[in-house]
Amino acid sequence: MIKAFIMLQCKKIWSTYSFIPPYLIFIFWILLLYFYRGQDTNSSYALSVFVLFVITMWLTKIIFHSDSNVEKHLFYIQLKHRKVYLYLKMIVCLIVLLPLIIFSLVYPIIFNLFDTTITVRELILAILLHIFMVLLAILMTTFVLTICHHVKKLQWPILCLLTLLVISQDLISQQSILFKWLKWVLPPVSRLLSMMSLEDSASLFYLLCHIIVYMIILVTCITIADDKIEVI
């Protein structure tokens, strides 16, 4: 049933063409970003993956809203629990985003658009960067959609506000000691974007641990929020 559900959801997204606008915007951004050769590896991947973060939020919302209320209730019965439906939806989001992740990683390499040949270490870090950014965006969006289930009109404003806070969290936290807590509440996107430039293995390990712990906390928060609503 799990495999059938995932295949059905993916087929529904592809057949409705709802993925096309975010896909086209991201592809256009990548083509524009690498319009000239000789791009810096670290900064280019950081720019592409940040846009992917926003696109991921958009696609996640589309995927979670692709089922009618009747379909959702049928899936709850077939999957035995709402949480299973929720987690499988997140897996579907990741599958739908895989082509964009691959395109973002491979396009500049195939056409030799970087100023230097990418190293194995840089490639591994770039892959991790893309995967972690996409996972963070999926989890963050799922959390917002869950807590705002009964007030859907607030979903987009909250997601936009979170995106702005994520972009400017370093700047805001520097303005006053009162805002230092933002670094621990918001997703560590700015630190993640600097991952490829980290030379110290200890700093890199600490960053990866921080991200993994943050994602575990997000999953826990999603589970708790889901327990408090009657219908997703």
Image: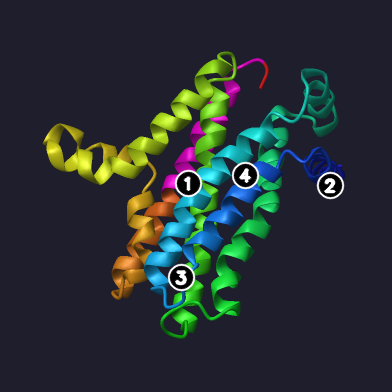
Colouring chosen for the image of the structure: rainbow
Label 2 secondary element: helix
Q: In this view, does 5 lie to the left or right of 83?
A: right
At label 3, the amino acid type is Leu
Label 3 secondary element: helix
Prevailing secondary structure of the magenta residues:
helix
Answer yes or no: is residue 83 visible: no
Question: What is the spatial separation of the Cα atoms under label 3 and label 4, in whole angstroms?
Answer: 25 Å
Q: Say which of marks 3 and 4 sits in front.
A: 4
Please name the residue that numbered disc 4 is placed on: 22
At label 4, the amino acid type is Pro
Of callouts 2 and 1, the N-terminal one? 2
Please name the residue that numbered disc 1 is placed on: 215
Q: Which residue is painted at 46% across and 72% down in the image?
A: 36
Label 1 secondary element: helix
Q: Which residue is painted at 79% across and 30% down in the image?
A: 80
Answer yes or no: is residue 60 visible: yes
Q: In which quarter of the image is residue 162?
A: top left
Of callouts 4 and 1, the N-terminal one? 4
Please name the residue that numbered disc 2 is placed on: 7
Question: What is the spatial separation of the Cα atoms under label 2 and label 4, in whole angstroms?
Answer: 21 Å
Q: Is residue 43 left or right of residue 102?
A: left
Q: Say which of marks 4 and 1 sits in front.
A: 4
Question: What is the spatial separation of the Cα atoms under label 1 and label 3, in whole angstroms?
Answer: 18 Å
Question: What is the spatial separation of the Cα atoms under label 4 and label 1, in whole angstroms?
Answer: 24 Å
At label 2, the amino acid type is Met
Q: Quadrant of residue 64?
A: top right
Q: Which disc, if any, is residue 125?
A: 3
Q: Could you tell me which quadrant the C terminus lies in?
A: top right
